[in-house]
Image: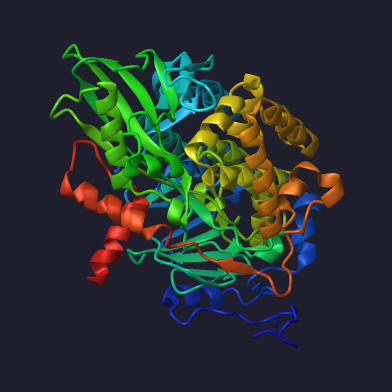
Amino acid sequence: LVRGSASSRHLDPHLIVMPSRARAASCMALAALMAPATVVVGWSPSARLASAAAQRRRNVASAASRRVTPTAAYDHEVDVAVVGGGPAGYAMAALMSSDHGASVALVDPNPEGCWPNNYGEWREEWQRLSERLGMPELMDCVTREWEITDTFFGGSFGAPWDERTRLDRAYVQVDRQALKELLSNKIATSGRCEVISAKLNAKLVASNIFDDGIVHDSVGSTLTLSTGATVRAKVVLDATGFESKLVAREAKEVSGNWEELEPGYQIAYGFACELEDGIGPYDANAMTLFDYRTDHFDEGSTLLADAENRPTFVYVMPQGEQASGRQKAFFEETSLVGRGERRLGFAECKKRLDLRLKHLGVKVVPGTIEEEEFCYIPMGGALPDLTQRVVAVGGAAATVHPSTGYQLCRMLASSTDIAAALSQELAAPSFSPDCAAAAAYRSIWSPSLRLQRDFQVYGGEFLMAQPVEKLRGFFSAFFKLDTILWGGFLAGWPGLPGNEYHDEWNKRLSFALKLFAYMPNEVRLAMMTYAVSYSAEMGPGLLRSFVTPLFGTGPAPYVPTAGSGMARVYTTGDMEAKLEAAKMLAAAPTPGSLPSPQVQESTEKEEALV
């Protein structure tokens, strides 16, 4: 296929490469595109990728001039195809169609479905997002608000069990259905986006080559959906989540790591219920973000030993007094991040939550449990390959905070930059889908933001390895910092409050030293020891992140490099955890309980195998 040696990047100027199973309609369409001088297979030449987005002049074309009239060859012909029906997919479809005037096809397998997870966010971040997105209506998507936030880290370093650390920062619960309705209304009123109820059954098998469903050529892509419908698009966005089949992850040679960076998993089990005698030790007017206490386990028991080695905390959202006159609350027992032997299952989290509530005297009114939640959040792992044609957004782009699992605000903040970059490329006199993808990836994973993420990844890896005593000591020190400092770390994305204290190497170094000063000696020793072992295994990524002048910025991830390329496609994840959640949901269904898309897909795979 490639003229010259195997390593040559000179393409036959009249060659189109297609998977053998491509649809007939796509074949006809590609045959009609033989006129362009070069058809790009995989990535375009490196000079073009590196400079086109920054140096090329764009004309300010009107949205109407960019819109394409569908032809007989395709059922839908648009500027942008968005694949995935979660918050990331709807946000990108709304921004591209409503704010940037692009024609959009949103491929959602279940447009009428409900988003399954509860979203809790800091009010300050949510307010900032409403301004950044130009959506004041975001504040109407808040179902509950608490002016103060509580944490409990007693039981370590001399702190009594009942010690409460109060944070003077407001927290909100996002009404996920109101959020979906808001974005759906923006999509509908734009008049430029069609929501298509279908799946895209495609899997990446080589760089920019799919087994079925997607075919790239020099000027765009053709998608064949599960319904048989075809979509022709200039740009394809992947909003199907972290375990996407459509995007490759960058190889360790590109990231600068010595070993592959495996993802961890945040596992949590929770439910909402009415309570017989109030909410126990928790303040009904405060959000409880962390309760890391372990005094509900019997001294010397194997349960206590396991909880100390593989810690969990409870997260409490009081819901106020109900019509019955009883208090209602949402409780969730959470493993912050785990992998391998340190990963907990949903059944263990459920058992620990039951024991905790019983110890605290919190009595659930029989028959009132609803919205049983099985929270599954992949964290960390490798970034997407930034030279590929399909543009990953949201979880697929690894925007989940590697230390905390926060994602919604980070995804929404990143979406404005991606939309602006793509809009500029779509308006260019000579459009290139490769240049558009490169511009989008540069907007979301700039060199400086990659360094900031390296710092966050180390934080997640360190927390994953610690016993409960050291976690309590760490978080107790963390929340002694100024609110803008710890809040900025938890946000950790451009445009969100406090990020300006973490977006450069010297600021991260200052943050680390201030945090170190508050830590107990045992936690300091653990932090230093782990930093040495982590760097010895993974390479200088951590050191680059906060002493950049000495260690440099690492490899250039935006240019294809011989011998590197894509490392893998994340498709499986923690299958054991997902199947466990599916079985628990099936065994005892409760009102309002929905499986996540990952859990649902895993169930379908298992049934197909059977």
Q: How has the structure been colored for display?
A: rainbow
Check the image and report above or below for 322 versus 474: above
Question: Quick one: 147 or 397, which is closer to the camera?
Answer: 147
Q: Is residue 424 left or right of residue 87?
A: right
Q: Quadrant of the N terminus?
A: bottom right
Residue at figure coordinates x 54%, y 22% from the top left: 127
Residue at figure coordinates x 29%, y 50% from the top left: 581
Q: Is residue 197 visible?
A: no
User: Is residue 438 shown above or below 151?
Assistant: below
Residue lying farthest front? 300
Number of marks drawn: 0
Of residue 194 and residue 468, the one placed in the foreground of this image is 468
Residue 59 in the figure: left or right of residue 172: right
Measuring from the top left, give residue 168's x and y in whole percent: 54, 14
Q: Quadrant of residue 206?
A: bottom right
Q: In x, y percent, where is residue 77?
A: 49, 58
The vertical placement of 165 against 420, above or below, is above
Which residue is outermost to the right?
549
